């Protein structure tokens, strides 16, 4: 037998038993006549002891073993004289009587410890060694726990998990498609799904009224900390439901995950209309772990000869409570912060509410102390507070303030780890106008239904239409989103035409869906959650990469297997792709179908 127990389970109740353990050599120490080896497997670490006096040749052999050797050791469980309360197995050790080397190991390029000396690049190249580290193991265990809890909950609610294909035709979700050439249909390509959106809708037409799938999705977009070219969704769809039913069902799922994975009882999630989220938090994914909402002050500051404010569409700010004594340097840092290109504000106007009750601002030239006090009142400020004001175009100023708000939350220590504040953001606009291309894009995707009362606006004012679309947000992270769908062919057709599709293009790309709608499509709606993101939030991590077994780096590469990589000429030939054609960098754009979402 290669093992009778794991390295994580032995304790004083096993004292005196003869056991065999197998695992990796974590570290060894020679202490005079004794040699200690920490043996590690997935379940924990157990101390092995070799005694030079009792069995000198065995002890000498043991001293030759290197880090990460795989060994199997047999011996008796004994009480330790020097107990380690930090280890579950810390009360015992194994007095080894014999061992076998199952495999040798080169010295690993970095230490297999939680605090390793290996940099990211090196760890990714040797990901199989990196995954031996406790932190990564705990992350993957958490992910597994989330997946099982999700399946159990949804299955109990009559959802069935159905797999949908990976080799499909484009599903527009706002990103570029990954494409796969077809050998059997030369010159033609599959697209990998950006999500199973159209298939899950077809499953509703087919009558599978509660579907889910923990499923891989593929989007060819620029990567950031919380993006991967392939990522996993908990994808769900239901028939005969209203938005209310969906929110309740999936709030149930979220509460179940909080309970089973984090042992947290959550009260009902607040719901916030999109407009309010933008107005108060400058974001459609507000972090509501802390207050500091945005206050608009146009009417108080315009007409006082301060050009920046007079020219601005919106003048608004936040109250950084208790920060009136911020130094010049701290204020300069905030100015630099908002001037970064990602935010693009021209600067910050501040008003200090002195502890003596007197205001002092960076615009004293234009505003009297009374003016300033009335602004402070609008912010419900108290002596000791600091008001930070931005001005400019409406949308941009709101989002800039949203980012500044988060920065202040961070600086003031208000983003407490372990504190979870979920909410639903509802009533999203259906469409988004793009100034560059001068056309509408779907805010969510083109299958989202307008609110019934807003349908007439399709003809008159498409930008004002609200959708039955919703997002689940936790601590400022969009965890999931979905919508009630269009299930009527004519409305779907109309929607494509608002999005700039010709009838032929719409029929070519989505004819199958519109045809299906002619065969008794039930009203339906759904949602999809970013599984990697959700796990990362629950794990308190910064990057989804840490919760994916084999992630890609920021350039979309897997540095371990070295992919993507060139393929053989032979493979091109089989696919009927001429090398010269493949190497062309620009194809005529006219051959590309219109996109329905603005590329993200
Ligand atoms: N397919 C959508 C997405 O991937 C989610 C949904 O509408 O259910 O974002």
Image (tube, rainbow, N blue to C red):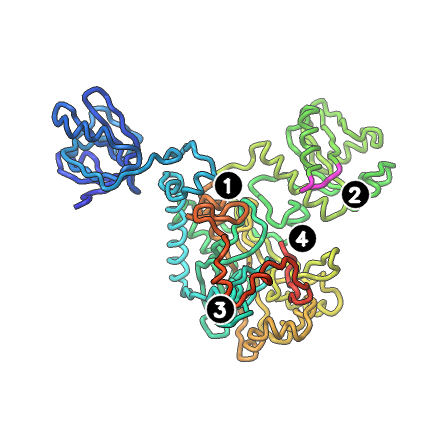
Q: Residues within 10 Å of mark 4 (few under 14, many from 20)?
A: some
Q: Residue at x 37, y 46 (%)?
A: 141
The residue to which callout 3 is attached is 183
Residue 208 in the figure: left or right of residue 76: right
The picture quadrant where one finds residue 405 is top right
- Image mark for residue 205: none
The residue to which callout 2 is attached is 298
- In the rendered image, residue 588, in percent from the top left (x then y), is placed at 68, 64
Q: Residues within 10 Å of mark 2 (few under 14, many from 20)?
A: some
Magenta span: 341-346
Tell me which label, 2 or 3, sits earlier in the chain: 3
Question: Residues under labels 2 and 3: Cα distance?
Answer: 63 Å
Seen from the viewer's position, the closer of residues 558 and 570 is 570
Q: Nearer the viewer, mark 2 or mark 3?
A: 3
Question: Residues under labels 2 and 4: Cα distance?
Answer: 18 Å
Q: Is residue 58 highlighted in magenta? A: no
The picture quadrant where one finds residue 194 is bottom right
Seen from the viewer's position, the closer of residues 474 and 346 is 346
The residue to which callout 4 is attached is 275
Question: Can see residue 56?
Answer: yes
Q: Nearer the viewer, mark 4 or mark 3?
A: 3
Q: Dot 3: what SS? A: loop
In the depicted structure, whether residue 71 falls above or below residue 163? above
Q: Which quarter of the rendered picture does the C terminus lie within?
A: bottom right
- In the rendered image, residue 469, in percent from the top left (x then y), is placed at 59, 60
Mark 1–mark 2 contact, CB under 8 Å? Answer: no
Tell me which label, 4 or 1, sits earlier in the chain: 4
Q: Residues within 10 Å of mark 1 (few under 14, many from 20)?
A: few
The residue to which callout 1 is attached is 542
Seen from the viewer's position, the closer of residues 56 and 435 is 56
Mark 4–mark 1 contact, CB under 8 Å? Answer: no
């Amino acid at each position: 037998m290669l093992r009778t127990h794991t390295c994580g389970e032995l304790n004083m109740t096993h004292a005196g038993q003869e056991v065999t353990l197998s695992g990796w050599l974590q570290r060894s120490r020679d202490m005079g006549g004794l040699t200690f080896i920490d043996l590690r497997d997935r379940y924990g670490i157990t101390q092995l002891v070799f005694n030079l006096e009792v069995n000198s040749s065995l002890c000498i052999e043991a001293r030759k073993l290197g880090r990460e050797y795989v060994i199997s050791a047999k011996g008796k469980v004994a009480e330790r004289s020097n107990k380690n309360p930090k280890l579950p197995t810390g009360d015992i050790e194994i007095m080894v009587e014999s061992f076998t080397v199952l495999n040798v190991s080169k010295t690993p390029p970095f230490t297999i410890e939680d605090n390793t000396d290996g940099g990211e690049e090196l760890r990714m190249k040797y990901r199989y060694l990196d995954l031996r580290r406790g932190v990564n193991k705990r992350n993957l265990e958490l992910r597994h726990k989330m997946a099982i809890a999700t399946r159990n909950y949804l299955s109990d609610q009559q959802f069935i998990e159905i797999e949908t294909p990976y080799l499909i035709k484009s599903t527009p979700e706002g990103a570029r498609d990954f494409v796969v050439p077809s050998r059997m249909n030369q010159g033609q390509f599959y697209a990998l799904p950006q999500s199973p959106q159209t298939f899950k809708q077809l499953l509703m037409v087919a009558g599978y009224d509660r579907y889910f799938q923990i499923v891989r999705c593929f989007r060819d977009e620029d990567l950031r900390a919380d993006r991967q070219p392939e990522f996993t969704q908990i994808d769900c769809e239901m028939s005969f439901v209203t938005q209310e039913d969906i929110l309740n069902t999936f709030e149930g799922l979220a509460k179940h995950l909080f309970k089973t994975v984090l042992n947290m009882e959550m009260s009902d999630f607040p719901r916030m209309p999109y407009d309010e989220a933008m107005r108060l938090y400058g974001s459609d994914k507000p972090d509501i772990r802390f207050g500091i909402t945005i206050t608009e002050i146009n009417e108080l500051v315009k007409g006082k000869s301060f050009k920046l404010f007079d020219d601005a569409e919106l003048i608004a700010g936040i109250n950084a409570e208790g920060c009136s004594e911020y130094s010049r340097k701290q204020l300069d840092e905030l100015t630099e912060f908002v001037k970064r290109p990602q935010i693009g504000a021209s600067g910050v106007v501040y008003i200090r509410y002195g502890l003596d009750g007197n205001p002092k601002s960076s615009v004293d030239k234009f505003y009297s102390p009374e003016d300033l006090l009335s602004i402070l009142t609008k912010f419900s400020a108290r002596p000791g507070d600091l008001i930070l004001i931005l001005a400019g175009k409406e949308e941009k100023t709101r989002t800039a303030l949203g980012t500044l708000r988060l920065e202040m939350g961070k600086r003031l220590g208000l983003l407490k780890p372990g504190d979870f504040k979920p909410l639903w953001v509802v009533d999203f606009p259906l469409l988004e106008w793009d100034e560059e291309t001068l056309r509408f894009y779907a805010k969510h995707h083109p299958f989202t239904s307008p609110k019934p009362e807003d349908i007439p606006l399709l003809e008159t004012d498409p930008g004002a239409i609200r959708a039955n679309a919703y997002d689940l947000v936790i601590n400022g992270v969009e965890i999931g989103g979905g919508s009630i769908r269009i299930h009527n062919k004519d409305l779907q057709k109309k929607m494509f035409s608002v999005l700039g599709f010709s009838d032929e293009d719409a029929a070519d790309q989505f004819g199958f869906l519109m045809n299906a709608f002619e065969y008794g499509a039930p009203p339906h709606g759904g949602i999809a959650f970013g599984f990697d993101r959700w796990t990362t939030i629950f794990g308190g991590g910064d990057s989804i990469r840490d919760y994916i077994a084999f992630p890609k780096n920021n350039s979309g590469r897997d540095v371990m297997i070295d992919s993507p990589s060139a393929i053989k000429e032979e493979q091109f030939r089989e696919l009927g792709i001429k090398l010269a054609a493949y190497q062309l960098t620009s194809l005529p754009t006219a051959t590309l179908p219109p996109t329905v979402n603005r590329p993200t």
